[in-house]
Image (cartoon, coloured by chain):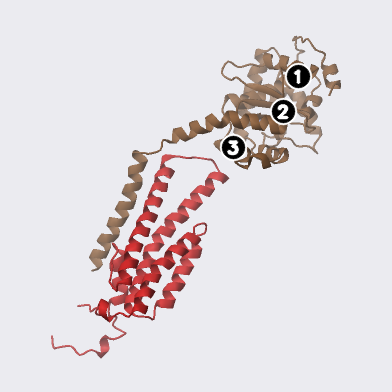
Amino acid sequence: MKKRLWRDFLILLVLFLGVWIFFVYFPIVDSDEVKVTYKYKENEIKQKLIELMDFKQADSDTTQLLRSLGELKHLVSDKDVEYELYYSDNREINAYALPGNIIVLNRGIILECDTPEELIGVIAHELGHLKMNHHSDQLITTLSIELLLVGSGSTASEVTKILTQNAFSREMETEADDYAIKKMKELGISPNYLAKLFKKMYKRSDMIPEFLNSHPGMNERISKFSKFPYEESKLTYTFDWLQVKNSL
Amino acid sequence: MSTDYYPIQQPEDLPAREREDAMGAYFMMFASLAAGLPLPIINLIAAIIYYHVNKHKSRFVRFHSLQSLLSQLPVSLLNAGLVVWAISFFKYDFNFNNTFLSYLIVVILANLLYLGFSIAAAIKARQGLMYYFLFFGKLSYEIVYKVREEEEKIYRNNPPI
Ligand SMILES: [Zn+2]
């Protein structure tokens, strides 16, 4: 009797593991297809996000600010990443890279930049996140659920919370910084410009934005960018930066 | 060493009341399985309580209750695994891979099998019949019908060996 019990137990166990392993090797649902479905929904999510958060697209001719940001966007380009640049009327000193190849600049960070070169550095850093696909599937999923399922009920502050809670890892930040350095050099801008911006942000210890918090130790970061000697950039713009900032 | 078993009751010896109790064991387990889906510990406790309530009724009722309880254990565990795995998606990374999908299939199959066999067993129990699941049937029989030394054997007269 004992033997037969064991035999039956083994039959059940083999049956269970067998079915499991069988489906692992002969899947009935292709998990890549599931990812494709998410990608397909990405556009819809993007539109809802922009609408809800009231992001203004750079490049449109409506205001001096958006025109100027459009000019900066054209400078910071990457053949592999087709991104969109947006402005958000938010006082927080912050910038975001969002799924769907979106970069958002807050009013706060624009006001903090004394020169357009500093802002170019910020855009380049965020572009680095996009280029290296730093977004977790989790962020995309959470955003999708919030914007597609919860839908009309979600508020801008809830979405902002999701965005700020899903910070990048330290390694990702280092990668994005390295990308920004490379990009700035390409444009003939000394990475030292970003060091200046970081120092200003560091002084405002009361505000620790996403752009700084999960990041490699701030001192480490400042010294990394300070290694590059300061040289005034030779770039010229069709706008006057001070005037643009005053319009905010 | 020979082992003795209590005789299995035949349908004509079983009053309707006992048949219904035996049938109820299976239906009770479904209900608790469904209720306990988010937290499988709940239905486990419910199942154990039901078994203990019916333990002192006839061996027929006890057998069916125990078979139902034991066969529910692995199904509950599988369901619990699924719940934990699904929650981890939201806490960590959304990794919708094949290992998970096939586990999902296995869990669904296990639940369907459990449901199907339990319904069959419930119908048989109502008719006053035994119904043995693979493994769990034998195990329950062993536990319920085996004569334990300390209980009765001492009172038995055996022929000389
Ligand atoms: Zn960053």
Seen from the viewer's position, the closer of residues B13 and A229 is: B13
Q: Which chain is brown?
A: A
Residue designated by label 1: A66
- Disc 1 to disc 3, how far (Cα)? 28 Å
**Same chain for the residues under marks 1 and 2 in the image:** yes
Seen from the viewer's position, the closer of residues A123 and A204 is: A123
Three-letter amino acid code at disc 1? Answer: Leu
Q: Secondary structure at mark 2?
A: loop
- Disc 2 to disc 3, how far (Cα)? 18 Å
Residue B105: x and y in percent read 39, 47
- In the rendered image of the structure, the colour used to display chain B is red
Cβ–Cβ below 8 Å for labels 2 and 3? no
In the rendered image, the vertical position of residue A247 relative to residue A14, given as above or below: above
Residue designated by label 2: A55
Three-letter amino acid code at disc 3? Answer: Ser
Three-letter amino acid code at disc 2? Answer: Phe
In the rendered image, the vertical position of residue A204 relative to residue B40, given as above or below: above
Residue A100: x and y in percent read 60, 27
Q: Secondary structure at mark 1?
A: helix
